[in-house]
Image (cartoon, rainbow, N blue to C red):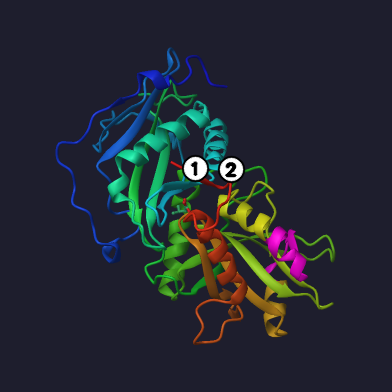
């Protein structure tokens, strides 16, 4: 529901900063540390619906300590990017998917839904205003973070009577501090990220904070990220297995050769326990269009870590990569699982496998407007 008053684009106001920031050199960008000059905000109240959208100088929020977001985690967010192509044209990548997902996430936690196409119009205005912050070098972009919080001052547990949708932006390069290098994952067997009937498919901040301690523990052992598993019965064998779900910051793809010689690219299905990645969906569509004619099978299906480890031991694990807005397409070198280091098909001197590289080139080619494609929206 777009409760009560819809967003009114005709009353959109822009107040420009009087103290523009200095740009940061691309090589100095650390993911999500530097922000642009402005922010976009839309307030909502149960009594009046969506109030007039505004762009203001980037500034602190002032909220009462009893505001419900601080107590009961009424917060959902998105990650999207603006790219600059060779001609200087600014582009967004499938922003309709982000708006759809944010509406699903906020609806799950009793925050108000909104008209996605209107917020895309506002984000386009915001991007035009912040154009000087959008890097043009390939691999760099403006990371856009829409965020919605419940702002009602109350300790009562109930649907927030007011909310704030705001959008900030940060020029970024590669997500991992190691750059475009293959990363190593630790398959976590002592904690779970999400479960059937839970909120693992919603992009809620509350899904991220609990993943940090396992991430810190993995880091002490030299792994950049956790691979989240979910123990379940394998219907084919009746045995309990650790099914592969996702990495906390990206979805995961595995390319293997099956025992019958069939090459297969697979990723976990959207069963409510994994995030519905925009890049995940794009990779699946591109793989179906471009890899299937080359003899590949492309699957969204449940598969477990023992299958991946067996494939590696038998020389059938070709490549593993992660996908995400922040991570784009990130090659994986190894996965530690129950004391075994599963080698994901890369030679020691190799940072990326051929399928991962082609996929990254296809996705980036569209994002940076080198390939004309309906997923790339001109701003
Ligand atoms: C993204 O890929 O945009 C994400 O939201 C992942 C992470 C940075 C939280």
Quarter holding the C terminus is top left
Query: In the image shown, does 310 or 348 lie closer to the viewer?
Result: 348
Horizontal side of residue 58 vs 107, given as left or right: left
Q: What stretch is highlighted in magenta?
A: 287-306
Is 296 magenta? The answer is yes
Q: Which residue is drawn at 47% across and 26% down?
A: 157
Horizontal side of residue 37 vs 346, given as left or right: left
Q: x%, y% of residue 39?
A: 31, 37
Q: Which residue is drawn at 47% across and 60% down?
A: 327
Q: x%, y% of residue 259?
A: 81, 78
Residue on which the image places disc 2:
199
Q: From the viewer's perspective, is residue 286 above or below residue 342? A: above
Q: Looking at the image, do the residues carrying marks 1 and 2 touch, with CB atoms under 8 Å apart?
A: yes
Q: x%, y% of residue 172?
A: 35, 57
Distance from mark 2 CB to nearest ligand 1 atom below 8 Å: no
Quarter holding the N terminus is top right
Q: Residue furthest left?
A: 19
State how far apart marks 1 and 2 are (Cα).
8 Å
Task: Characterize the local packing of mark 1: few (<14), some (14-19) or many (20 or more) Cα atoms within 10 angstroms.
Answer: many
Is 213 magenta? The answer is no
Secondary element type, mark 2 = loop
Residue 188 seen from this side: no
Q: From the viewer's perspective, is residue 144 above or below residue 293? A: above
Quick one: label 1 or label 2, which is nearer the N terminus? 2
Q: Residue at x 23, y 57 (%)?
A: 24
- Residue 204's mark? 1
Q: From the viewer's perspective, is residue 78 above or below residue 135? A: above
Residue 165 seen from this side: yes
Q: Which residue is drawn at 51% across and 67% down?
A: 330
Secondary element type, mark 1 = loop
Q: x%, y% of residue 78?
A: 47, 43
Horizontal side of residue 52 vs 64, given as left or right: right
């Amino acid at each position: 529901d777009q409760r009560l008053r819809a967003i009114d684009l005709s009353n959109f106001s822009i107040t420009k900063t009087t103290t523009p920031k200095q740009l940061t050199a691309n090589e100095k960008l650390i993911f999500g540390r530097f922000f642009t000059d402005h922010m976009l905000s839309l307030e909502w109240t149960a009594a009046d619906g969506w109030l007039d959208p505004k762009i203001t100088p980037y500034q602190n929020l002032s909220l009462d300590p009893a505001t419900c977001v601080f107590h009961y985690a009424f917060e959902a967010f998105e990650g999207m990017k603006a790219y600059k192509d060779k001609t200087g044209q600014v582009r967004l990548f499938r922003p309709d998917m982000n708006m759809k997902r944010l509406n699903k996430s906020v609806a799950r936690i009793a925050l108000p839904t909104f008209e996605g196409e209107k917020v895309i119009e506002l984000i386009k205005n915001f991007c035009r205003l912040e154009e000087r912050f959008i890097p043009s070098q390939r691999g760099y972009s403006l990371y856009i973070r829409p965020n919605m919080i419940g702002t009602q001052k109350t300790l009562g547990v109930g649907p927030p009577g007011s909310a704030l949708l705001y959008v900030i932006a940060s020029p970024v390069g590669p997500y991992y501090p190691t750059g475009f290098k293959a990363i190593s994952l630790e398959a976590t067997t002592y904690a779970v990220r999400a479960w059937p009937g839970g909120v693992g498919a919603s992009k809620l901040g509350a899904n991220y904070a609990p993943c940090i301690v396992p991430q810190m523990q993995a880091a002490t052992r030299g792994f950049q990220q956790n691979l989240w598993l979910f123990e379940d019965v394998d219907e084919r064998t009746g045995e309990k297995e650790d099914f592969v779900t996702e990495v906390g910051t990206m979805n995961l793809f595995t390319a293997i050769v099956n025992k019958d010689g069939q090459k297969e690219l697979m990723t976990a299905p959207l069963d409510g326990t994994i995030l519905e990645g925009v890049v995940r969906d794009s990779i699946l569509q591109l793989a179906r269009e471009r890899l299937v004619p080359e003899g590949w099978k492309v699957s969204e299906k449940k598969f477990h870590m023992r299958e991946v480890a067996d494939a590696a031991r038998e020389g059938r694990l070709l490549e593993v990569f992660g996908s995400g807005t922040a991570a784009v397409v990130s090659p994986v070198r190894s996965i530690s699982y129950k004391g075994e280091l599963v080698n994901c098909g890369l030679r020691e001197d190799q940072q990326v496998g051929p399928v991962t590289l082609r996929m990254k080139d296809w996705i980036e080619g569209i994002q940076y407007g080198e390939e004309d494609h309906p997923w790339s929206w001109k701003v």
